Image (cartoon, coloured by chain):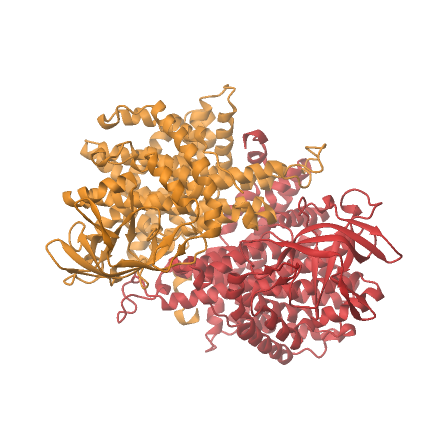
Chain colours: A orange, B red
Amino acid sequence: MPSYNAPIRDMQFVLHEVLNVSSELKKFKAYEDIDQDVINQILEEASKFASEVLQPTNQAGDLMGCTRNQDGSVTTPSGFKEAYAKYVEAGWPTLSCDSAYGGQALPQIINTVLYEMLNSANQAWTMYPGLSHGAYECLHSHGTEEQKNRYLKNLVSGKWTGTMCLTEPHCGTDLGLIKAKAEKISNEEYKITGTKIFISSGEHDLAENIIHLVLARLPDAPMGTKGISLFVVPKYQIENEVLSTQRNNLECGSLEHKMGIHGNATCVMNFDGAIGTLLGEPHRGLQAMFVMMNAARLGVGMQSLGLTEVAYQNSAQYAKDRLQMRSLKGPQAPQLAADPIIVHPDVRRMLLTQRAYAEGGRAFTYWIALMIDQCAQEQNANRKQELEGLIALLTPVIKAFITDNAFEATNEGLQVFGGHGYIAEWGMEQFVRDARINMIYEGTNTIQSLDLLGRKVLGDMGAKLRKFGDVVKEFIEEEGVKKEMMEFIDPLNDLVEQVEKLTKEIGLKAMLNHEEAGAAAVPYLRIIGHLVYSYLFAKMARVALNQKGSKDTFYEAKLGVARFYFAKLLPETASLLVLARSGSKSLMSMDEALF
Amino acid sequence: MPSYNAPIRDMQFVLHEVLNVSSELKKFKAYEDIDQDVINQILEEASKFASEVLQPTNQAGDLMGCTRNQDGSVTTPSGFKEAYAKYVEAGWPTLSCDSAYGGQALPQIINTVLYEMLNSANQAWTMYPGLSHGAYECLHSHGTEEQKNRYLKNLVSGKWTGTMCLTEPHCGTDLGLIKAKAEKISNEEYKITGTKIFISSGEHDLAENIIHLVLARLPDAPMGTKGISLFVVPKYQIENEVLSTQRNNLECGSLEHKMGIHGNATCVMNFDGAIGTLLGEPHRGLQAMFVMMNAARLGVGMQSLGLTEVAYQNSAQYAKDRLQMRSLKGPQAPQLAADPIIVHPDVRRMLLTQRAYAEGGRAFTYWIALMIDQCAQEQNANRKQELEGLIALLTPVIKAFITDNAFEATNEGLQVFGGHGYIAEWGMEQFVRDARINMIYEGTNTIQSLDLLGRKVLGDMGAKLRKFGDVVKEFIEEEGVKKEMMEFIDPLNDLVEQVEKLTKEIGLKAMLNHEEAGAAAVPYLRIIGHLVYSYLFAKMARVALNQKGSKDTFYEAKLGVARFYFAKLLPETASLLVLARSGSKSLMSMDEALF
């Protein structure tokens, strides 16, 4: 059975030494009390919950899965309910929520670190509070005062949970095809009818009420994405702060049997004239939902970061314990029957791949989370817009790059175990299966890449990308003159130049033929991902080099991982650059009938 | 539920048009009756068995898995037993076996094509006859006349099945650590005691007897791999051609719960003084077992080829049916609510990746299977040695390159289905889970790469590799002058030169430090894989170009897939060449304690 210890020191390294989170946040009045001690205390407590309460439920959750009972209720795996009760009792759901509704008003970055831990411990479980937090954000941004008063307090406390009901059997990516209907029945109330599928946390036994955010069409709605409205549809209505005993006309029709995340109830939800209220403007439901989806994309990145870290921890331990063969240099542990497999170069490659993707992903997601906090507080309109641009640009990269890397990383983790990795008991194959969904939901990774290249980069003629380039170039100018940084700055600088050239080329080709963007988008996103990681690993190396001479070997490891990244992972860009330029012809010229 | 139709035309293309199998085989007396009609007839019959009888058992097999009963017997999923009975009844197990024991004495290549189909239909089931065939080959090569007479007839007919019992809890890769003991109790008989794990098909209800080939140590055995002997240990002893009613002292202690191949019984086998006979020389069991393992490595390649093909077929169909979004060029099916997703460039990339890996893998495995037939019949000692060399060189490439590609391909297949790909019902996620084991068993893919680079390439100073290079260069010289072949020959020629240079570089570095070979091996194997595929795709393009002007669009598709391969898959070598040169330092310099 796998184990998990929150990598607190590594988290602190990114928070305090690389990003200087507390001094950055102290600049804002809302966070003037945030200091390293506050953050460290929360990390300590969160880590106990994650390792001691939550992680022990993960494997059982996978084995048992969820059960739909005859009355349509759903029972979560044993231990899930108890873990959720403790989570709520300790106040974890309130962490970064508005104090007007009982929240602790702490910055997102702290919630982000918490979520890394929760996801390492149990991704399927974490989806229950994760989706609730998304629903909270959407209601908080778009709800009327009455809606906020009715729903937010209990979503913040965790007493209730939330969902996003978007997908229908015939449409996932293409929400313009949504068929669910909404009919006005009073000044405020609507009847919602339709079938939604793939509804994570759609029904369960963790909380007394579930607040569904549902996309549906009003009778006068225009066709396509501009005719979709968003509704708040609670499982139980609330009258004067009291739950109705009668259930709204909605139920879980069945549970999906899935490759992984068995502990999360993935429901077919049938709405049969369920009563709800409009959230935001009519026909502008997708815009409102996008608030939630952007947060959800960062959230999916956190899921994959969590899995990468826990896979690394367990495979590193196994590689130190498992004796098999001798080192190519001759016996390293001659007193034993064989050497521990960590002596083998390719085993180390598999371990360091996981570790580098964990460390890179951590720096990346924490950096963006900090930007989200800064952006929310920023008063200067220009600076705010700049931050919004960077967040918009990098959100699809977080979603796709981190989840693709995590699938590779968890697979390397499994492979380190050899045949044992394929056996359920060791828990490594669960990480692979759980990680696989992250490449699909909240917009497939292809959709993310089209969003990045089409909307975020070419959509504003590269303006947001240039802003990001400026951030990187500033760092290069500062550090490029220092000899000890050359090994990191040279390849980073080279990649910046390559990206500038490549982006112009694709932009020109795509003007003549949009399919050129479609063909280039996936490798393009991975190139941008590597640009982000080269920048962040160079920054982390900078911090580690500043500790030269320190007896703390922690910094040696940081340098080692950064060097591994530049030697063994960044070279993927050599192929990606060829592929991003290789055009659409070889894809599009074959007639459909020949497939 | 997925479906499968054997790609007979594609198989015939490789057999008859690319490899000219029947005219090549007719050169040998043993195969003078083999012609295209004979082969085509067998393909037709095999395809019916695969699609109509076997494929319908695949998904149920995954859902039900195997059950160990209280008495230690194992029940396979429903339908498995009936399919096996039909398989035996039709004489499929006898196809390429020695006629002295009831075989049809057909060439291996035909059996290889059969196995592609069986694996597309149901990999877990195919492992039962697959392992039996391995046991047949091992007994046929190393058995005494008495052993052959006792066991072969029923292994050939399929009345009995076989296993390979190698792995123990503390050793998989490192068989030198084996602890199972063998004690002589009479002139011919030995008592075998020990625990074997991960024994595929170790116990089941398909056949009345199971012949285990078991590695164990004799009391006087030297330490390590040179002290391991091989034993034949039947589940039921045979006395005068009659099965003993009393079971040998061996049993399935438990079944493993695995990520995939649920339909195959992966057993912990306890041998508690089980009676067996020595197979081959004492202490030379590993050498005898290697005969079986080489065939098994080709067999694993066939498993992954089968999965690649079936994943392609189902995702291509889905991509034509599923309507979602519009083409980047504007509506292609304006009469429908949305375009079929096959209009999107990245969906086509995912489809063509699968298809190219299926077509490349098919050409590769059939080519090697033909060589195995030629080698077995060849009278000229030089030519025989040359063929042996090529087979030895390319066997680890088949195992690792095809299984890695299949994991990528089945994952692309799943991704084409979006969220539906993650749902068990559609069957795509089963292909991914089944494909995952192929990268591990019969020697992990890292072990294959070390075998290739260390033993097969550097071990003879590149002699075998040069022979392979000669084959490729001969083709380049013939075709390089033809303008229509330039697009294929130029990159092929370039890669040949790169490989020559790279191999010398690694050879020199590895002489000074063996870990340099360990660090380079994995990318090196993939580069050789791409060299093989560039060669074979160029050959296939040659055949297709010869049909220029034909109205048969089949050849257009062959050219389209070849062009896709060169444009979108071969460019991986750009990164691989960097990685193969990037050395061991970034892997080995971090202290073990820092992991």
Residue displayed at 24% across by 56% down: A248
Q: Quadrant of the C terminus of chain B?
A: top right
Residue in the foreground of this view, choosing between B121 and A446: B121
Judge left or right: residue B275 versus residue B580. right
Q: Quadrant of residue A274?
A: bottom left
Indicate the position of residue A270 as horizontal and vertical percent values. Answer: 29, 61
Indicate the position of residue A142 as horizontal and vertical percent values. Answer: 19, 45
Indicate the position of residue B442 as horizontal and vertical percent values. Answer: 65, 54
> Image height check: is B72 above or below A12?
below
Is residue B485 among the parts visible in the rendering? no
Q: Quadrant of residue A186?
A: bottom left
Residue occupying the far front of the picture: A245
Residue in the foreground of this view, choosing between B281 and A266: A266
Is residue A412 among the parts visible in the rendering? yes
> Image height check: is A452 above or below B7?
above
Judge left or right: residue A488 versus residue B470. left
> Image height check: is B564 above or below A1?
below
Residue occupying the far left of the picture: A187
Residue in the foreground of this view, choosing between B503 and A403: A403
Indicate the position of residue A115 as horizontal and vertical percent values. Answer: 37, 38
Residue occupying the far right of the picture: B187
Q: Quadrant of the N terminus of chain B?
A: bottom left
Residue in the foreground of this view, choosing between B570 and A17: A17
Judge left or right: residue A259 versus residue A335. left
Query: How many marks are shown on the rendered structure?
Result: 0
Q: Quadrant of residue A397?
A: top left
